[in-house]
Amino acid sequence: MNATLWLVVLLPIVAILGLFVGYFGARSATARTLGDAETPATRIADDAKRLVDQARSEADAKLREADTKIRAAELEAKELALRVRAELDQESRHRQREMQEVERRVVQQEEQLGRRLDQLDRRETEFQNRDRAMGERERSLGEKETRLGSALEEQRRKLESIAGLTTEEAKRQVLAQAELDARREAQLLGMRLEEEARQTAHVKAKEVLATTIQRLAPDYTVETAVSIVDLPSDDMKGRIIGREGRNIRALEGFTGVDLIVDDTPEAVLISAYDPYRREIARLALQRLIADGRIHPARIEEVVEKVKKEMEQHLREEGDKACFEVGVHGLHPELIKLVGRMKFRTSYGQNCLQHSKEVAWLAGMMAAEIGADVQLAKRMGLLHDIGKALTHEQEGSHPELSLQVLTKYNESSQVINAALCGHENVEPETIEAVLTEAADGISAARPGARRDVLESYIKRLAKLEEIAMSYKGVELCYAIQAGRELRVMTKAEQISDLDAHQLAKDISKRIEAEMQYPGHIKVVVIRETRAVEVAK
C-alpha cells in the first residue's frame, strides 16, 4: 500500500519535471525568437503551474483516501481480534464446564464404588457366617444320619427275626403284590374307560366300523357301485332332499351320480359305476353335512372345490406311485393318469396297485437277468395307462394307451410293452417280455382277482392259530364265516380281568397280522364248574 501511495505522488512530480525540462529546452531553442515567443511562454508557464497545482490536489486526495483505508483496516483488525478473543473465552468456559462435569461424575462413581465395596464386605461377612452355620448343621446331620442308620439297621434285624424273611425276600414279595395290584387297577381302569367309550361313541360307531373295514386290503378287492355316507341324524335326510327335491337334483346333476335316500337309518347311498364321480359326490356330501348349509348354490360351490382338490389328489397319488416304483421323468399329465388308476378296477383288482406290482415284478426279473431295470419298471407302470381313460373316451384300453403314450412322447419300447398281449402285438424287447410276464403273474396270483376256497380256509386257520398261541387258551373256534372268534380259556390260569385283556390282545394281533374284509369279533369265555357226586 505504501509503494502504491508513493508511486501516485511521484508520477505528477515526474510529469512536472518533464514539463520544466521541455520548457527550458524550448526556451533555449527559441532564445533567438524571444520577441515572437513571449506570449506563448507565459501561457506555457501558467499551464505548468496549473498542472502542478492539480497534481498536488490529486496527490493530497490520494493521501487522504489511503489514510482512511489504513484506519478502516486497523479498525477491522481490532474487531477481528476482539471477536476471536471472545470465541476463545467462550470455548474456554465451555471446556471448563465439561471438566467440572467430568470431575463431578468421577466423584459420584467413586462414591458408588465405595458403597458397593461396603456392601460386598457385609455380604462376605454374612456368607462366612452362613458357611460356619452350614458346617455345623452338616456335622449335626451327619451325626443324626449315623444314629438313624444304626437305628434302621437294628430295626431291620428285629423285623427279619420277627417275620422270618430277609430284606430281599420281603422286597420281592412287596414288588409282586404291588405289580399284581397295579395290573388289577390298570385292567379295571381299562374296562371302565372302555365302557365309557362304548357309551359315548355311538355317534362315531359307524364311521369307525367303515374305517376298520377299509383300512387293510383283503385278499381281493371288489369295487362296489355304491358308497355309504353316514348322517348325524335322520333329520339331515330332509335337508339333503330339500324343498321339492331341489337339493338332491342339484347334487345328482353336478356330480353325475344317483343319490338314494331310503329308510336306512342315519345313512344315504351314492350309486354310480364310475368310482371317480362317486368319490367326488361322497366328499362333497360329507362337507355339506358338516357345514350345514345345503342349497343348490352351495352344492355347486362345494362340488367344484372338491373336483379341484381331486385333481390335486390324483397328481399326488401319481407322484407317490412313481416314487414307490422308482420311475422318474414322466409327463405331468401321465402322472395324473397314473393317480386316476386308483379309481379304476379290472376284474375286481385295483388298476394302480396292479400296475405297481407289475413294475416291481418286471424290475426284479430284469435285475436278475441283467436287463434295463428302469425301463422295465417304466413299462410295468404304464402298460395299462389306457384304463384310466376308458370312462371318458371310446376305444379299448390298448388303443387309449397307444394314443396317450404317443401324445406325451414316450419311447416306442414303452408303447410296444403296453400293446403286448393285445391285438396280436409281439414284444420287441426283453423288457417288454418281462412286463408281459409280470402282468400275468400279478393278475393270476392267488387272491388277486378271485377268492378261492383255499384262501378262506387259510384265513380261518390263521385266526385259530393266533388264539391258541396265548397261554391259558384251551379251545378256540372261528365261526360265522370267520367274522367271530370264540376262545375257551382255563379258569385256573385266566382270571376275569385277564380274560378282558386277552380279548384285547388277540384282536390287536389279528389287526396287525391279517388281512380280512369287514370286522372280526373276539369272544373270550371263562367258565368255572363245581362238580360233586352224591353217593
Image (cartoon, rainbow, N blue to C red):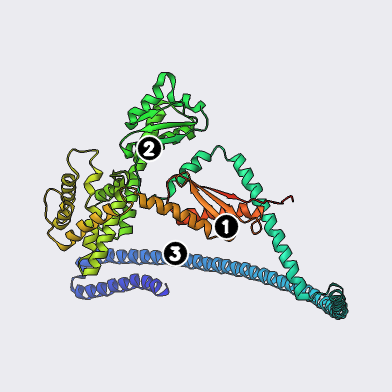
Q: Which residue is mark 2?
A: 305
- Give the mark, 1 or 2, whose residue is nearer the N terminus: 2
* Residue displayed at 72% across by 67% down: 175
- Position of 176 with respect to 485 (left or right) is right
For label 2, count other residues whose C-alpha is less than 10 Å away and answer few (under 14), some (14-19) or many (20+).
Answer: few
**Three-letter code for the amino acid on which mark 2 is drawn:** Lys
Q: Which residue is mark 3?
A: 65
Element class at badge 3: helix
For label 3, count other residues whose C-alpha is less than 10 Å away and answer few (under 14), some (14-19) or many (20+).
Answer: few
- Position of 412 with respect to 13 (left or right) is left
* Residue displayed at 64% across by 59% down: 493
**Three-letter code for the amino acid on which mark 1 is drawn:** Val
Q: Which residue is mark 1?
A: 473
Which mark is in front, 1 or 2? 1
In the displayed structure, 179 sits above or below 395; it is below
Q: Position of residue 140 (x, y in %)?
A: 88, 79
* Residue displayed at 55% across by 60% down: 470
